[in-house]
Image (spheres, rainbow, N blue to C red):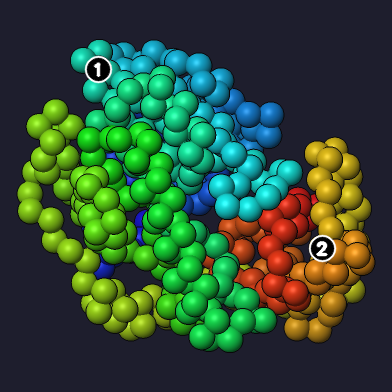
Amino acid sequence: MMESSKAVGATTPHLKTTHRDLQDVDAIYLSHIHPDHYDGRFFDYPKDTPIFTLKSKYNFLARNLVSQGYINVVEIESGFPHTFREATLTVFAPFTSHVFHNSEIGNLIDSALVVEDINGTSAFNANDNTPDTDSCRILREKYGSFDLAMINYNAAGPYPSCFRNLSDQEKVNAHNFVLNRNIRHLIECCNILEPKAILPFAGAYVIGGKEYKKNKFLGTTTWDHCAQEIQKQSAHNALTLREGDTYDLLLGKSNKPYKPIDTDDQDKYISEVLSYLKYPYEFDEPIKERELCEKVDSAIKALRARVSKYNIKVRSKINIFTNTTCFAIHPGDPEFGVNLDFYLDERLLDRILDRRSHWNNAEIGCHIEIDREPNIYEIDAHTMIQFFHN
């Protein structure tokens, strides 16, 4: 599946399977509203298909599905089992605001899923809802040893690839640090969960279009590399699968020999094919500066109201720069002293202000450049700016 902010998933050539090949399903679980999990442009199923989501006060995903005409959206309370045919489904709200950084708000939208069947087989699908070690202890005590644990190992996002305040070497160092940290955490979680098999999961993507050169600095790697590190650093059984492969939980084996990812072929495909993609905003007509200023002023007022509603406290000073204008978005705390500057195409900013695009998707997709001085990460600042729209 191809998106405007993320290109084809980390396999080459592009995936042969489309959503049209996946119509005959009993039900769908949607973890959250990010477009690599739910892309409304391609999400097209019978409107009465049971769709399971987390019941949340923010409710972004469920409201979107209902607005698209889906009449069988089942919101499941976090931690409460839900029976569907021979399976028991338990959906979990974010385990922590953030695994690696202090945050008052942090993760607002993700969820995870535990599936059990009547024979006692179980699988844990963390999606982007990375558990902390305390959550893993609770899961282990509640479910015992999972037959399969699918846990995130990547850090999908703009760091370090989009940060102007970092040199290329600093970006490489940050890339390696983030990956090593995440893989170590995955192993720590599995030391507690002790699943029979681990599937390194979620967050692998590549950037196409004019931003394709940022791929070498992304905080991501292939599942092959992650599996190798798991085998090197632990005794866990790391599982790797490609498109069309299946894994039998009862037999503990795949249906075919695994074919490793050819990263040279992947890089070639990115540079020779994906780099020529155009993003939707690149086809937009330029917006007049006065009109953009009026929209920004309105969005700042809306942002302040939402910050008050959700009690978001941010200490960073935030500015947004387009090609011609600087917009002061949030004054911050002078004693904290962090300046967080965002740079983006005014056509993309216009789309974000009108809700035709979303800030978080644009940021993860590397469409927004960032300058952060000093280089102190305040995660709630990045959460707050997601509410900047009309």
The total number of labels drawn is 2
Q: Which mark is residue 58?
A: none
Question: Which residue bears the numbered disc 2?
Answer: 316
Q: What is the quadrant of the N terminus in the image?
A: bottom left
Q: Quadrant of residue 265?
A: bottom left
Q: Measured from the top left, where is residue 386 in percent x and y?
A: 71, 54
At label 2, the amino acid type is Ser
Q: Considering depth in this image, is 212 or 353 the residue closer to the camera?
A: 212
Q: What residue do we see at 29% from left, 56% from top? A: 233
Q: Residues within 10 Å of mark 2 (few under 14, many from 20)?
A: many
Q: Residues within 10 Å of mark 1 (few under 14, many from 20)?
A: few
Q: What residue do we see at 28% from left, 43% from top? A: 198
**Left or right: 121 in relation to 276:** left
Q: What residue do we see at 63% from left, 57% from top? A: 360
At label 1, the amino acid type is Gly
Q: Considering depth in this image, is 46 or 322 the residue closer to the camera?
A: 322
Label 1 to label 2: alpha-carbon separation: 49 Å
Whether residue 249 is visible here, answered yes or no, is yes
Under circle 1, the secondary element is loop
Q: Measured from the top left, where is residue 104 in percent x and y?
A: 73, 44
Q: Measured from the top left, where is residue 388 in percent x and y?
A: 78, 55
Whether residue 52 is visible here, answered yes or no, is no
Q: Give above or below for 226 relative to 285.
A: above
Q: Earlier in the sequence, mark 1 or mark 2?
A: 1
List the single residue furthest toward the left.
Answer: 256
Under circle 2, the secondary element is loop
Q: What residue do we see at 57% from left, 36% from top? A: 94
Q: Which mark is residue 120?
A: 1
Q: Measured from the top left, where is residue 334 in percent x and y?
A: 92, 66
